[in-house]
Image (cartoon, rainbow, N blue to C red):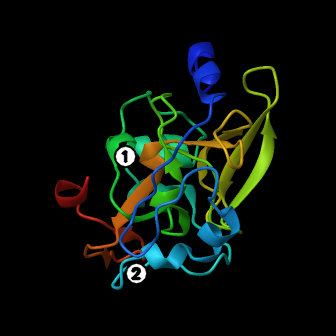
Amino acid sequence: MDRRKLLKGLLAAPVAMTVATDGVASQSEGTMNVEELQKNWKDLLAQDADVALTTEPLQRSEEQWRKILTPEQFRVLRKEGTERPSSSPLNEEKRPGVFVCAGCSLPLFTSVMKYDSGTGWPSFFTTIPGALATKTDFKLIWPRTEYHCVRCGGHQGHVFNDGPPPTGQRWCNNGVALQFIPKAGKTSRDRDGVTVVSTARFL
């Protein structure tokens, strides 16, 4: 998920990020307080959102995961695959809301943490605290930092140090590994306890 050299150079310039409003003040990269964005992430969570608010490990067999996830979700979340760039509708998602793990509904990012990296994958400059764990990945010979959901262990993507201010981080995520819950939207939980969002309405 490395970005092209040209995009890397462009992001070296000052980047002004407009964050979602609806209860959260817009801020530029010069005044953005990352700790406040992390601390107040629930401000962007829909009132009726039925998401996981615990990081207690969730254990399921491979057979159970295959029944719950789509084939592409299973390939990415359980087998550490990578979706095709620009294949996720979440690339264009700009409404206020929260991005949760598609495997277990644990909140991982908010809309104010998202930015357009130009890579073709949803990208974020910071995360909801305590939601993700990292490990070193050598699949492409040189080491990369892979991250996954702390609750279900589902693979989300890789984090790089070529992001915009104020963190300089690019959490490069597979869109298929996420579900987006708009702040103004209805959610429900299926029989396995996974948050379901109507893709026909919201994506």
**Residue 132 placement (x, y as % from top left):** 68, 59
Question: Which image quadrant: the N terminus?
Answer: top right
Q: Is residue 102 visible?
A: no
**What's the residue at 62%, 66% (across, down)?**
128
Q: Which mark is residue 90?
A: 1
Q: Which mark is residue 50?
A: 2
The amino acid on which the numbered mark 2 sits, given as a three-letter code, is: Asp
**Residue 83 placement (x, y as % from top left):** 46, 33
Q: Farthest residue in the bottom direction? A: 47
Question: How many other residues sit within 10 Å of disc 2, few (<14), some (14-19) or many (≥20)?
Answer: some
Front in this rendered view, residue 43 or 191: 43
Instruction: Tell me: 188 left or right of 82.
Output: left
Decide: is 89 above or below 48: above
Nearer the observer, disc 2 or disc 1?
A: 1
Q: What SS does tag 1 mark?
A: helix
Q: Which mark is residue 186?
A: none
